[in-house]
Image (tube, grey):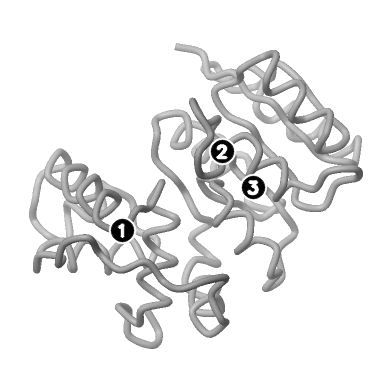
Amino acid sequence: MTIRVLIADDQELVRTGLGMILDAQPDIDVVGQAADGVEAVALARSLRPDVCLFDIRMPRLDGIEATRTLAGPGVEAPVAVVIITTFDLDEYVYAALRAGARGFLLKDAGSELLAQAVRVAASGDALIAPNVTVRLLQAFAGSAPAGPLAQPVEPLTEREEQVLAKVAVGLSNSEIASELYITLSTVKTHLASLMAKLGARNRVQIAIWAHQTKRVPTGG
């Protein structure tokens, strides 16, 4: 099936470039572009794309609030949002992930990773740019959380702790399956259990929780 994508960025050249990269993919179709967050939310609601690709800093409504409006807690039928940014230990990225973003990329990530992030988000999973995963999450772990950290509604099993640690350093489901010698479906089962126990909406929030609760040793 074709993945329908909405792009929002206040720089026309960036929007055009991202659109050309994604339209070149046989399974991706850019169905709309927006220059600010207000327009992005309106288009997302009217077009119902499979994935929204949002910049963080945009006029009128930034990418964080646009993400929260479309994918935040309590939103019925949330839209998959991937943040794409120049990211340099930017505190706004953390807020975007807390707001419900399914992942983020740097704007210099390259066409292959960009397309992969869109496909992963469309499948219900999340992708964090591998080259910044550990640096990002450890930076967040050292900062004060926005509120009290959620505690598991039930204790995590030993295997769930192992999966948690792998998610926290940015491994994909297939990589986790390979490293832990379990099947892909078993990984997905453990991830679903982790999300339920932690009240997390996606693997990005699981990873943030793992770092903030010091589940991951220094250095990843």
Mark 1 or 2, nearer chain start = 2
- Local crowd at mark 1 within 10 Å, few (<14), some, or many (≥20)? some
Q: Which residue is mark 2?
A: 71
Q: Give residue 191's position: percent from left, percent from top.
A: 24, 49
- Mark linked to residue 198: 1
Q: Residue at x 77, y 35 (%)?
A: 8
User: Marks 3 and 2: which is nearer the front?
Assistant: 2
Q: Quadrant of the N terminus?
A: top left
Q: Give residue 217's position: percent from left, percent from top.
A: 32, 85
Q: Amino acid at mark 1?
A: Leu
Q: Residue at x 83, y 33 (%)?
A: 38
Q: Residue at x 55, y 67 (%)?
A: 132
**What separation in Å lies between label 1 and label 3 (alpha carbons)?**
23 Å
Secondary element type, mark 3: strand
* Residue 23 placement: quadrant: top right
Secondary element type, mark 2: helix
Q: Is residue 184 left or right of residue 10?
A: left
**Which residue, as the protein is rendered here, is positioned at the far bottom?**
218
Q: Is residue 173 left or right of residue 30?
A: left
**What separation in Å lies between label 1 and label 2 (alpha carbons)?**
18 Å
Identify whether 132 is placed above or below 69: below
Identify whether 174 is placed above or below 97: above
* Residue 111 placement: quadrant: top right
Q: Amino acid at mark 2?
A: Ala
Q: Which residue is mark 3?
A: 83
- Mark linked to residue 189: none
Q: Is residue 116 left or right of residue 39?
A: left
Q: Quadrant of the C terminus?
A: bottom left
- Local crowd at mark 2 within 10 Å, few (<14), some, or many (≥20)? many
Identify whether 37 is placed above or below 178: above
* Residue 144 placement: quadrant: bottom right
User: Marks 1 and 3: which is nearer the front?
Assistant: 1
